[in-house]
Image (cartoon, helix red, strand yellow):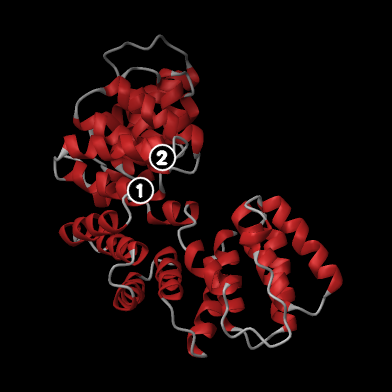
Amino acid sequence: MHNPGKHTSLLGHLKAAFLLLPFIVGSVACNPQQKKGEQMVNLEKVSNDEAAAIRHLDNAIQNNQKDASLYARRATLYLKKGNFNEALQDVEDAITRNKNELAYLVLKAQVLRAKGNPKAALPFALKAERNGHQSTGLYILLSDLYLQLDERQTAETYARKALELGPRNAFALYYNGLVSTASGDTTKAVNHFRKALKEKAGFTEAKRELSNLLIGRGELEEARKLLNSALADKPADGKSWYYKGLLFNELQKSDSALYSYSKAVGIADTLQKAHYEAGKLYYQKGNYEAAITHLKKAPASVFSSEQLVLMLAVAYERTGENIKALEQYQRFGSMQPDNRLAQQGVARTKSKLTMPAVVNANDTIR
C-alpha cells in the first residue's frame, strides 16, 4: 500500500506554492500604521490589471520618491507576477525609507522565500516577530520556512500559533495539516485538510495533499475525486499529477501511472520521487534507457537503496554501458557482499569489458 509519508516532498511543494500572499500582501497594502503624509495608492480603484497597476505606481514613485508605501505596494505586485528580483529591490527601497514598518520585513522574507532562499528569509520574519508583529500570516510564513529548513518541531509551534489566532483560517489549517503529515500523524493531518476545505472549498493544495493521505489509507474513490478536482483547478500542477500516478499504481494501472508521472516531471523536473516511480515502471517494461534517465534523478533518500542500485546495474548492462554497470554491481556487492547476483554481475561485466559477448536474457533479472 502507498505510504503517504514516503512520497510527500514538503520542500518541493513549499517552494512551488504562494499560499501566503493573501496574508503578507494584505498586511502591506492595508497598513493601518501608515505614516501621516504618505499617500496610499488604492490599487483596487486603479485596475485589476497588474501591469496597469504597476505603471500607475511607477508614475506615483516618480512624483514622490520618499513614500515607502509605494515601493512596498509595487513589490507585492512584482511578487504576484513572479518578478522576484524587482520585488526584492522595491521592498529594500521601502525598508530604507521606513525602517520602522515591520510589515516590510515580513514582505522581504516572503520575497526571499519565493526566490527559494528560506535561510535568508528567516531572520527578517523573526525580526518582525521579535519587534511585536503578530499575525496569522507571519506565523504561517515562519511555519513554512522552518518546514523548508527541516526544523519540524519549530514549524509545528508556529503553525499552532497561526491556528490560535485564526482557528477557522484555511491556510492555518492547511499548514497544520502539513506539519502533521511531516510528523507522521496522518489522522490529524486528514482532519486539518478537511477543515481547510470546509473553510475554503476551492483550496487546490488542500485537495491535493488530502488525496495523497487518502491514497495511503486505501480510500481511493475519494482520492480520485479530489485529484480530478485539483487538476481541474490547476492542470499544470506537477505534484497533483504525481499523486495521480500513485493512485493509478494502487489501482494496478501501470500505463496510466506512467503517463501521470511523465506529466508530473514534464511540468516540474525537480519532482524526484516522480522520476523514481517512472524509472521503476520503465524498468519493469524493459525500456532500460528511459529507466536510467529517470532513476538517475531519484531522491537522495533512495538513491543508495539496494533496489535502485541493482536496477541501475541491470539497466546499464542491458543498454551496453558495461563500465557503469560494473560500478553499480560493485556498489550492490558492497551492500550485500555474499549476494550471488552482485558477484555474477561483476564477473559478467568484467568479462564483457575484456571480451564482448552476447548477453543471455537469463543472465540478469528484471
Residue 9, horizontal then vertical, whole percent: 37, 51
The answer, for residue 366, to whether it is visible in the render is no
Question: Who's the residue at 32% across and 38% down the image?
Answer: 229
Along the line of sight, which residue is nearer the eye, 169 or 311? 169
Tell me the tag on residue 202. Answer: 1
Along the line of sight, which residue is nearer the eye, 27 or 163? 27
Residue 183, horizontal then vertical, whole percent: 25, 64
The image quadrant that residue 277 belongs to is top left
Above or below, 279 against 141 in this view is: above
Above or below, 16 against 44 in this view is: above
Quarter that holds the C terminus: top left
Mark 1 or mark 2: which comes first in sequence?
1
Query: What's the CA distance linking mark 1 and mark 2?
Result: 8 Å
The three-letter amino acid code for the residue at tag 2 is Asp
Q: Judge left or right: residue 46 versus residue 204.
A: right
Give the residue number, with chain letter if any, for mark 2. Answer: 233
Question: Who's the residue at 42% across and 66% down the image?
Answer: 144
Decide: few, some or many residues near mark 2? Use Cα within 10 Å; few <14, some 14-19, many ≥20: some
Residue 337, horizontal then vertical, whole percent: 26, 42
The residue sitting at the front extreme is 45
The secondary element bearing badge 2 is classed as helix
Asked if disc 1 and disc 2 are in contact, CB closer than 8 Å, the reply is yes
Along the line of sight, which residue is nearer the eye, 88 or 278? 88
Decide: few, some or many residues near mark 1? Use Cα within 10 Å; few <14, some 14-19, many ≥20: some
Above or below, 319 against 134 in this view is: above
Quarter that holds the N terminus: top left
Question: Who's the residue at 30% across and 47% down the image?
Answer: 207
